[in-house]
Image (cartoon, grey):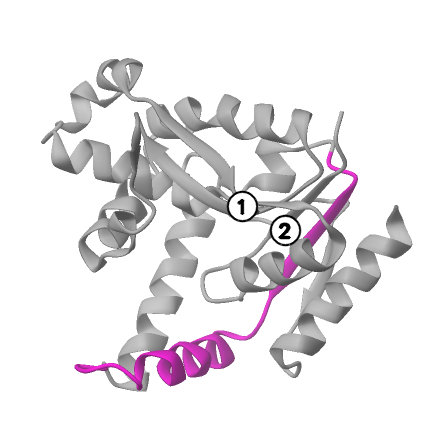
Amino acid sequence: MGINIAIDGPAGAGKSTIAKMVSAEMGYIYVDTGALYRTVALYITENNIPDEDIKKSLENADVSLKFINGAQRVFLGDRDVSDFIRTPEISMAASRTSAIPAVREYLFETQQKIARENNVIMDGRDIGTVVLPNADVKIFLTASAEERANRRFKELSEKPNCPPYEEILEDIKKRDFQDMNRETSPLKQADDAILVDTTKLNLKESADEIARIIREKI
């Protein structure tokens, strides 16, 4: 049984970036659950599967994570789709399909199997509450909606067609509401999770704080 670290939190809190940094520092495997959901969304999109057929169709899907030269790659069958799942189209599809119970059920065992066999840091929105309820350390990572929107705006401002800050902020607030109020596995802080608010912390300070908490707990 591996050591399991669960990091949950709202969109734009920096979970994936921070989890990757801490995993590299501590020698743990980082499990990008978002990549798994994006891969399922890619499978559904490429095969034009209607919602009512998703549960049955997923019986034929083969989604897996492989660690190649220390880096996580996600596969659909024998095809490495790590780069194909990062398009805006698949991002939107993943946001929708991740709320479908059949999709969450399908990926549940995949995530638990990885955690049983490795020392992992896994991030998402229901890791500490649903996927790894017995995780050794649970962290709820958050920041104000305004700060998350500001970080996202700075990231997108380097690319063409950057939306205005106000639009990004509104999208984040809508995503928060959807995530917290969805019927299946809503976003919430586990009772035994440690709250870490990074509103006033930079990226390195945030990662250092997470690493400190993990070392203290284990």
Hey, what amino acid is under mark 2? Ile
Q: Which of the two residues, 141 or 170, is positioned nearer the viewer here?
A: 141
Rendered position, 62 above or below 169: above
Residue 86 in picture, x, y percent from top left: 29, 55
Residue 64 is one of the magenta-drawn residues:
no
Residue at which label 2 appears: 7
Residue 137 is one of the magenta-drawn residues:
yes
Q: What residue lies at 74% left-to-right and 62% top-to-bottom?
A: 210
Rendered position, 137 above or below 16: above
Hey, what amino acid is under mark 1? Asn
Viewer-side label of 2, 1: 1
Q: Secondary structure at mark 2?
A: strand
Residue at which label 1 appears: 69
Residue 47 in picture, x, y percent from top left: 12, 29
Rendered position, 159 above or below 179: below
Q: Give whichever of discs 2 and 1 has the lower sequence position.
A: 2
